[in-house]
């Protein structure tokens, strides 16, 4: 039988951007020995962090995060907007995108042949550090007179966005599962597979998920 993975404290979880954070410090003139002393570890461990062969924890890297965390966050952001007849609002959202899933209208001709795949809605999940996530629900912009979909060479410009509150991973899973059940009736394949895609995305980014049966390898 497999074992269910127990959730760790966010500060004790492996910090996925260990390598990037250490390189920011090294590029700023730190030596591996200075980083090791500051993080209370050995230089050989810092060498592994630099190569990406080992991950540290957020707690152990706190001295570096206090100095360079803002640069790490700044390197991953997206610009969004909400667009209505009354007003336009613009948003800058930091944090790595761990899931971006579009839901498309599969338009067919009178014989049932697929003519065009038109994305109409989209779900984007940003990971903002610790155990904080932001979900963005997007709808495709259309021209008011013709109701035809807006086109643009910059893909982010064709979506109007609505934002969730910040959520923990547990709250995020409940939110997305509920969204799939209540809002994706027209997209049955997406409604069924979205819960899998979210959990896969979380695990791929080193974020533990409750209720997952683990079959660890023996090295």
Image: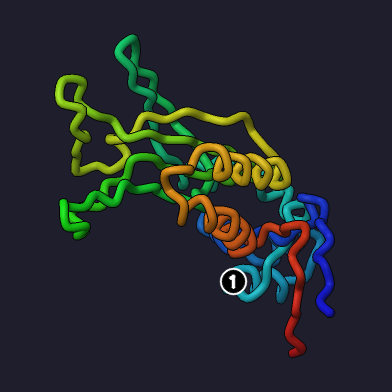
Is 32 left, or right, of 193 in this rendering? right
Taking the spot 41% from the left edge, 39% from the top edge, the residue there is: 78
| Residue 67 visible in rendering | no
The C terminus appears in which quarter of the rendering? bottom right
From the viewer's perspective, is residue 49 above or below residue 147? Answer: below
Figure quadrant of the N terminus: bottom right
In the visual, does 219 lie left or right of 184?
right
For the point 32% across and 35% down, which residue is it?
140
Q: Considering depth in this image, is 39 or 87 the residue closer to the camera?
A: 87
Asked if residue 46 lies left or right of residue 84, the reply is right
> Which residue: 46% across, 46% down?
75
In the current view of this chain or complex, which residue is farthest to the top? 86
Residue at far bottom of view: 219
Find disc 1 in the rendering and name its residue.
52
59, above or below 95, in the image: below
The percent position of residue 214, horizontal first and vertical second, equals 76, 73
Above/below status of 182 relative to 6:
above
93 and 116: which one is in front?
116
Residue 96 in the image, given as x and y percentages of width and height: 51, 49
Whether residue 7 sits left or right of residue 56 in the image: it is right
Q: Residue furthest front?
A: 111
- Kind of element beneath mark 1: loop
Task: Indicate the quadrant where residue 179 lies.
Answer: top right
Viewer-closest of 103 and 87: 103
Specify the quadrant of the image occupied by residue 33.
Answer: bottom right
For label 1, the crowd category at 10 Å Cα-Cα, with few meaning under 14, some 14 to 19 and many 20 or more, is: some
Q: Position of residue 114 (x, y in %)?
A: 21, 58
The residue sitting at 22% across, 35% down in the picture is 149
Image coordinates for residue 32, horizontal then vertical, percent: 65, 66
Q: What sort of colour scheme is used for the picture?
A: rainbow
Let me know if residue 135 appears in the view.
yes
């Amino acid at each position: 039988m497999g074992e269910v993975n127990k959730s760790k404290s966010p500060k004790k979880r492996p910090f996925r951007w260990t390598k990037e954070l250490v390189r920011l410090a090294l590029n700023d003139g730190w030596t591996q020995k200075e980083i090791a002393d500051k993080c209370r570890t050995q230089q050989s461990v810092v060498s592994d962090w630099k190569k990406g062969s080992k991950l540290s924890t957020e707690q152990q890297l706190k001295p570096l995060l206090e100095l360079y965390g803002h640069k790490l966050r700044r390197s991953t952001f997206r610009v969004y907007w909400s667009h209505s007849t009354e007003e336009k609002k613009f948003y800058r959202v930091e944090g790595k995108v761990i899931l971006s899933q579009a839901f498309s209208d599969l338009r067919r001709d009178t014989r049932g042949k697929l003519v065009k795949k038109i994305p109409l809605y989209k779900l984007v999940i940003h990971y903002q550090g610790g155990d904080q996530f932001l979900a963005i629900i997007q709808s495709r912009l259309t021209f008011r007179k013709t109701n035809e979909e807006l086109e643009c060479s910059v893909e982010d410009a064709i979506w109007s966005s609505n934002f969730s509150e910040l959520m923990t991973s547990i709250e995020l899973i409940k939110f997305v599962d509920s969204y799939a059940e209540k809002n994706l009736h027209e997209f049955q394949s997406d409604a069924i597979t979205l819960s899998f895609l979210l959990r896969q995305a979380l695990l791929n980014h080193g974020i533990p998920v409750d209720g997952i049966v683990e079959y660890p390898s023996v090295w």
